[in-house]
Amino acid sequence: MEILYLSIFFWASFFLPAHSQNVSTPNIIIMLMDDMGWGDLGVFGQPSKETPYLDLMASQGMLFPNFYTANPLCSPSRAALLTGRLNGMFSYTPQEIVGGISKDELLLPQMLKKRGYVSKIVGKWHLGHREQFLPLQHGFDQWFGAPNCHFGPYNDSNRPNIPLYNNSQMIGRYYEDFKINQKTGESNLTQIYLQEGLDFIFHQTLARQPFFLYWAPDATHAPVYASKRFLGKSQRGRYGDAVMELDYSVGQILAWLGTLGIDKNTFVFFTSDNGAALTSGPLQSGSNGPFLCGKETTFEGGMREPAIAWWPGRIPAGMVSSQVGTVMDLFTTSLALAGLVAPDDRVIDGLDLSPALFNNSLTDRAVFYYRGNQMMAVRVGIYKAHYWTWSNSWEEFNQGINFCPGQEVAGVTTHTQQEHTMQPLIFHLGRDPGEKYPISVLSKEYQDVLGRISAVVEQHVKTLVPGQPQLNMCDLAVMNWSPPGCEKLGKCLKPPPSQPYKCDWPH
Amino acid sequence: MEILYLSIFFWASFFLPAHSQNVSTPNIIIMLMDDMGWGDLGVFGQPSKETPYLDLMASQGMLFPNFYTANPLCSPSRAALLTGRLNGMFSYTPQEIVGGISKDELLLPQMLKKRGYVSKIVGKWHLGHREQFLPLQHGFDQWFGAPNCHFGPYNDSNRPNIPLYNNSQMIGRYYEDFKINQKTGESNLTQIYLQEGLDFIFHQTLARQPFFLYWAPDATHAPVYASKRFLGKSQRGRYGDAVMELDYSVGQILAWLGTLGIDKNTFVFFTSDNGAALTSGPLQSGSNGPFLCGKETTFEGGMREPAIAWWPGRIPAGMVSSQVGTVMDLFTTSLALAGLVAPDDRVIDGLDLSPALFNNSLTDRAVFYYRGNQMMAVRVGIYKAHYWTWSNSWEEFNQGINFCPGQEVAGVTTHTQQEHTMQPLIFHLGRDPGEKYPISVLSKEYQDVLGRISAVVEQHVKTLVPGQPQLNMCDLAVMNWSPPGCEKLGKCLKPPPSQPYKCDWPH
């Protein structure tokens, strides 16, 4: 592989102009990690410092310590990123799910097409795996990856293994054709996803067409995996090994942009879909740094994400922005960079981050923390108010499922869905990023802040158009039995009779 | 002040040779913060990123994420740093304390004198405030600072305010002559300590004598303070403001070394005396990042310290060392840099870090976590075994004193002094830096690790020479009533009759 790319490098350096693309349509790369925590990056305080390339990316770009996902779960967070909206994706998408991303939603690649962009998703989709929900039905021109999580292995009789797609055709299944060694954690999937990304960038550069690459590897989602070269290399075990491989891959992609001479015309943003999944235990989950709890919760550990913007020559190097951002801003910002305006026929929750990126200026904005369709909390300025608190149920907790291991804050990490709407719990996220010290309701500070936050919430509720729940129904018949292309591989499985039922969402 | 230094700059640039000192006796600067936590530095994951100068220092030097103090309390930690030994300083030194650093201990400045070093301490001493215990009696040539914490204000009738010394003479008292505004937190003390450091460096450079500067400001110890220019500037409130001012001061000192042309001949090490004092609450204490609990405890949050080594041209830039280090290593390393050997008539617990600093190589070493004279825990490799656990007593805890706010780990953060010597709690600090998941005693990993750790502990206990407790006795008559020099200022106070009693150490 290295020899191949060396020769391409020489070739490219002769034939490609240094800046082969139009600056009015910069390339866009969104790197979205899976269950990676804020605290997994060296630059965000991971003690074992596994991310030299990401730390370098930060030193060459802009770090966003106040960046959020839209939901502490993968599917709704990914839907929000691609649509710029809090929408009807209220839960996650297991194989039994009947629904998926609505055809009424406008996705980033659909929008970018108007300006001639070619879009590819590499890695996990997670917005519905039935045919009408797949990436190529929603604006992507290319896809290499899987529709669901890489759980397994299954025996293919009562549950099929997850298929991998190349564009609209299945090319194999996890554990069968794309190995993940359960015992050792070895898998070369990240290397494959890296290669797919590099190839796409290369071909688009040759074709001189602006591109959008949505690079969404899933090595840090349990069961975590890494390729042989990285296994055993970190101080954290398998999880840290996966981080090292992803970090290396990010470094390779950024270096490739330089090699191809398109780095000054490519906007790259690195982030994650939700907080580290602490309940998976120390070998299978990451770190949320100083923040409370993890994935599934609306505490900071569930929704604060690592975030780095990179665009040499356009975004000043080594900056730390205090701008509060969300994954939905990547939709709006990408449109702005491509010279497009956001659709005006719907509420768009994303903010154009250009002022922060290019002028280091700050825009006031609120962050809403949703769990399902319930607004649990809101951040305004440096303050966060919890209207509802919940970690998980006593029933789950007593079975050993713990979203906040070692972090109990009395009255905050509650095991019932506790309402505080009459008197929200308010925290100062500057001096108390860990949400450990609720501000006294008797203080003037509390009263002042509550007034400001209430106004924001009132406005939000007033303008809210409730999304149609897309993920209510489940059916074993809709699992990945016979994905398109299965017949060529002899991998079609027979589905059971359809028996739709209302999905059971425990959290 | 800036004009003065500008003129000195021009003057210096004409008259000082670029490298005016002997490389065989490099200057040594140890910057020791007070109660600053690992997580307070941007480079260690502080979300509000208040430390651009320290982050720059790290990028120009070597970061030590696995660096420890010798004790989670100020006095014993500082005694260990200056002597290279775990010694008889078992608790802290309030004004009532009769004892202090033993005359039998050999301190770093005493050793360095053999090679012609001139030594100054700027800031807090905290190794006993009676005359025989003060810095100039223990090898320092100069001192500007205070013997105790800046608690107060007191009314001088039943308790005197803490004096500040210039060398061997008191020059005033906190709150009276050196203001700390209780309400606003304003004080210019860090600026004074900065100036004292810069002046000393300048004069030593002119005199062409190698120097040891022990720069120990205390702005991050409650009650935290900052000067007007920094107040209100951070996202964290007063504590963060203090961090910003200290960060700025570190930047000024490093820049000054460059200006004077001695940066390539000066070894600088930045660290802190113990973990953030979480019990002081969010406005008055810092962050221990992902680590458990804080000051006073032997969990990682009490003893893991921020640490950066800097020496342009000698220590490679931008490195992260996995070497496990302790403040006692600063004694041994400084001696090695000055071409001295450590005293051979006593046990020295410090390690020479030169191999890590100059060759990025790793040396195996254990870390012992003491509380008083009780070995609570030990780290060997990436594993840590707790032989005893204790946060604080139920009695204190029920009064609202909490060393682990928001961090309860069942069976770990115990409120009784719980013995585990027969079956220590073992944690993997790589995948579990927060000490949340004790390794199952039934696992092979546990048995393997316990065998290795037991051997280390056995050896430690066998070679241990128990220190003489120095801090058992208290007496109101020994408080800072009439420090030397008080008569010139008319600030001598009348002590009460001597009534020695056994000190009460609640923790």
Image: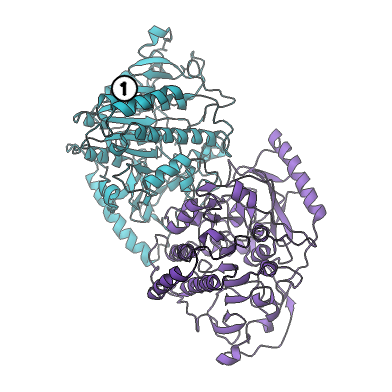
Chain colours: A cyan, B purple
Q: Residue A425's x, y, as percent?
A: 41, 55
Q: Which quarter of the image is occupied by the N terminus of chain A?
A: top left
Numbered disc 1: secondary structure = strand
Q: Is residue B13 above or below residue B491?
A: above
Q: Residue A9's x, y, as percent?
A: 37, 27
Q: Which quarter of the image is occupied by the C terminus of chain A?
A: top left
Q: Residues within 10 Å of mark 1 (few under 14, many from 20)?
A: some
Q: Residue B140's x, y, as percent?
A: 64, 73
Closer-to-camera residue (B205/B176): B205
Closer-to-camera residue (B307/B269): B269
Chain letter for mark 1, please: A
Instruction: Report if residue A306 is visible in the image.
Output: no
Instruction: Report if residue B170 is visible in the image.
Output: yes
- Classify residue A30 by image quadrant: top left
Closer-to-camera residue (A484/B480): B480
Q: Residue at left 63%, top 75%? A: B141
Q: Is residue B275 left or right of residue A323?
A: right
Q: Is residue A394 left or right of residue A140?
A: right
- Classify residue B394 by image quadrant: bottom right
How many numbered marks are there?
1
Residue identifier under label 1: A142
Q: Is residue A415 above or below residue A76?
A: below
Q: Is residue B358 left or right of residue A136?
A: right
Q: Amino acid at mark 1?
A: Gln
Q: Residue A236's x, y, as percent?
A: 57, 39
Outermost residue to the right: B462
